[in-house]
Image (cartoon, rainbow, N blue to C red):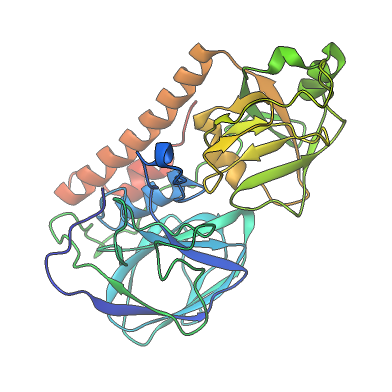
Amino acid sequence: MSQPTSQPAQAMIEIVRAGVLASVQDLGRTGYRRFGVCTSGALDPLSLYVGNRLVGNRSDAAGIEFTLGNATLRFLADGLVALAGADCRATLEGAPVHAWHAFPVQRGQTLTLRVAQGGVRAYLCVAGGIDVPEMMGSRSTDLKAGFGGLEGRPLRDGDRLAVLPPDLSRAPDISGAAVGVKAPCWTFGRTQGETPVMRVLPGPEYDDFLAGSQAAFWESEWTLTPNSNRMGFRLQGPELVRKKPRGGDLLSHGVVPGVIQVPPSGQPIVLMADAQTTGGYPKIGTVILADQWRLAQVPLGTRIRFARATLEEAEAARAGVSRYLQQIETALDWQRRGILSVARRAARTRPTA
């Protein structure tokens, strides 16, 4: 559920340069997959969540998702904003601003994002939240179906976006020390050398694959290819071969983000936020929920590995992310009460799962 509109919103942001791909996203459109409507929403929901909380928004307020940065915005009104996600070495009127921190902006000022480093997707959150029409309980852009967000499309140069009135009782006091948190580590310490490792639950059709292909799935490095998008991340590596003949296709069945399908090419596809709701390819596994936000920040051309996880491990990892978010909530609450600066407390917290 998104924030209610209680009074007319005003235009606050002008997109001077949209970059490679920018769109309005919140935490997604839930409860409609049975009707064939995909989830959409931020590919890295953790970053959007934290960015929203930094400016006093509800966690599900709409922000702007920038892919690879390289964008410029002009503010048409004063406000409070935060950047989270990939580090785009942002500057406000030429002066550096820190990601994962809230900072004030004034009418006429320009925010510039350079090409993203240490990740792929950056999120701009504005106190009040981006105001676009709410459809099916969400303001997210469904780029495939062409609805939601701003006219159901990516943002373009010259677009103007309004914001909802901020909840001043929840906005942080930024008159003192900077309000911010330490950037979470994309890998959570789970790497093999320099290779990010994603934890995976074996899927319903895992046993349909030859033993050699099962071993290759876990032991090989997989390269994220350029034809990946918000619907699915396509990987390149050894061919995964089923025991059954290729002609024995499955009946279409429900799928969700994180599912790893294997088409006839034998090259796996990890379904992402804009993925279809049904599919007929065998499912060799599912990236656990706690690692899906990390996968969203993996640059094209990067090699990743998969690690087998149990349901208990997946639940523990999800609980670890929840603990991290609760630490953020507590730190911000203390800061608002003047008990402890977020800069001293939250800057030391990181996800531990």
The percent position of residue 180, horizontal first and vertical second, equals: 37, 53
Image quarter for residue 206? top right
Q: Does 73 sit left or right of 29 as displayed?
A: right
Q: Residue drawn at (28%, 73%), measured in percent from left and top?
A: 79
Q: Does 161 sit left or right of 155 as displayed?
A: left
Query: Where 124 falls versus 110 (above or below)?
Result: above
Image quarter for residue 77? bottom left
The percent position of residue 160, horizontal first and vertical second, equals: 38, 80
Q: Does 266 sit left or right of 24 as displayed?
A: right
The percent position of residue 41, horizontal first and vertical second, equals: 44, 50
Residue 90 or residue 26, whichever sits in front: 26
Query: Where 311 falls versus 143 (above or below)?
Result: above
Q: Does 5 sit left or right of 345 as displayed?
A: left
Residue 340 seen in the current view:
no
Query: Where 26 falls versus 281 (above or below)?
Result: below
Residue 45 seen in the current view:
yes
The percent position of residue 5, horizontal first and vertical second, equals: 17, 63
How many marks can you see? 0
Q: Residue drawn at (39%, 58%), measured in percent from left and top?
A: 101
Q: Residue drawn at (76%, 37%), measured in percent from left and top?
A: 194
Residue 121 or residue 261, whichever sits in front: 261
